[in-house]
Amino acid sequence: METAAIPDSSRIWRQALKDLEIQMSPAEFRTWFADTELDSSEGPVCVVSIENPLTKGWLETKCRGMVARTLEDLMGRPVQVQFAIRRQHSTPSAALELQVPPAHPKGRRGSTVPTPRPRAERTASARFTFDNFVVGSSNRLAHAAAVAAAELPGTAHNPLFIYGGAGLGKTHLLHAIGHHALEDDLRVVYVSSETFTNEFIESVSRGRMESFRERYRRADLLLIDDIQFIAGKDGTQEEFFHTFNAVLEAGGQIVLASDRAPRALALAQRLQSRFAWGLVADIQEPDVETRIAILQTKLAARNCVVPSDVLGYIAERVPSNVRELEGALNRVLAQADMLDAPVNMDLARGALQHTLTASPDHRGSNPEAIIKAVCHTSGISRRALEGRGRDRRTASTRQLAMYLLREHTALSLSDIGGLLGGRDHTTVLHGHAKLTEKLPTDDRLKESLAAVRMELDRGA
Ligand code: ADP
Ligand code: MG
């Protein structure tokens, strides 16, 4: 079965819960997610089952987007999330029957936006579209190129290579292109390069290369997200090289997203130069006006109104990552909801005081400066920070570095891990989560954090 390589739902959900946990306070997390399970993750619809019927409405209105985003990040494809109440002996399939539009018979795993489906269903899953993408000077070129690729695939810049820091809208643009092209009934394949790699390995081992090639090489539009992950994977690069050529020769359009420019990718030379054949467009951090406009778009989608001073405050506090900007907005709204209080500046300050620590002053801090300041203020050497030592002081200093690097730079989790002695991204995620959890109640930690910030200010 082709589905064999898909991580099972419980594994995906375990990881998703870890990611969700750091997007809210521990109390909220326990209240809303304690008894959740992921019943199905194979079709376009992911069904999250819950035990407590009272939490369903809240999850639906407040958390659906966050859960979808988290699952999308993990699975590399767009999903719709539904919440279902778990009965004692209900089986996943019973839960599924309640709401799922039947998956497309040939639903291609990894190709999110498979073959055309009835219009209503397509629009329902179209969370990331051009309509709800806010254009500003930071992303104007990437946006215009994406629209051109969607409207005239194969004739515009080919390939289109979009790159930029985490949470700046690359996946959003890729999905928007996909949805737009689906309207024209084109064959669209969207995958992350990780999924491409996994499918490639699986196809080789199961002797299914023909169907693998058929799927990818015949795409009218091939959208590959997070292409940086094929770095160092020679076999996959080789296969992708041929995929790339075949799609282009057949007149198809290729769009790639990456966290860094083609020249900064550790790739075979011939791939690297091909990636720069068409148009290379970067996305920068949005300015404050764009950040406010994005917040307004997100609010409109949820039918919420928030006073403009609060919007301005949130936009000032989260300078560099749109995903975190949305997270901050969610936290403010959740707080208002739980306290049953109006959204005003006091509430926003309270909601964001601990979880959100990036002040505009530290915007785009230099990672090296952060590491230096951490070492200097803690008395832990750089070598110890990068090393394997796990004594309490070293370990907690390392977590502090992870936290600051995540909060104050646009580095990816893997990049942060790389800077801290080659640790992997889950370690960084965990370190950041641990700190976020401890921060509200740990005064020593607050002091350490303040000391590093002061040092950074002095150096700035
Ligand atoms: P990336 O793939 O670059 O890491 P995403 O595309 O996943 O980032 O974007 C993260 C979140 O920020 C998504 O919810 C996305 O809708 C939102 N976002 C980013 N840029 C914009 C924008 N210009 N307008 C509206 N939403 C945006
Ligand atoms: Mg992305």
Image (cartoon, rainbow, N blue to C red):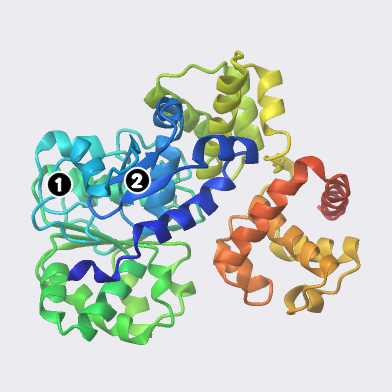
Looking at the image, residue 203 lies above or below residue 449: below
Q: Position of residue 261 (x, y in %)?
A: 45, 66
Estimate the spatial distance between the alpha carbons at disc 2 and disc 1, rounded to whole Å: 18 Å
Does residue 281 appear in the picture of this structure? no
**Residue under the point 71% across and 19% down:** 346
The residue located at (21%, 36%) in the rendering is 99
Q: Position of residue 431 (x, y in %)?
A: 67, 60
Q: Which mark is residue 182?
A: 1
Is residue 353 depicted above or below 146 in this figure?
Answer: above
- The numbered mark, 2 or 1, whose residue comes first in the sequence reads 2
> The N terminus is located in which quarter?
bottom left
Q: Which mark is residue 143?
A: 2
Q: Residue at x 30, y 49 (%)?
A: 78
64 on left or right of 391? left
Q: Amino acid at mark 1?
A: Leu
Identify which amino acid the numbered label 2 is placed on.
Answer: His
Label 1, residues with CA under 10 Å away: few <14, some 14-19, many ≥20:
many
Q: Quadrant of residue 368?
A: bottom right
Pinpoint residue 435: horizontal percent, then vertical percent.
72, 52
Left or right, 359 with reference to 141: right
Regarding residue 124, the answer to whether it shows in the image is yes
Q: Which SS class for mark 1? A: helix
Of 186 and 413, which appears nearest the observer? Answer: 413
Q: Secondary structure at mark 2?
A: helix
Question: Where is residue 312 shown, x and y percent of the image?
Answer: 61, 26
Q: Quadrant of residue 54?
A: top left
Residue that appears at 80% across and 63% down: 397
Q: Which mark is residue 32?
A: none
Rendering quadrant holding ligand 2: bottom left
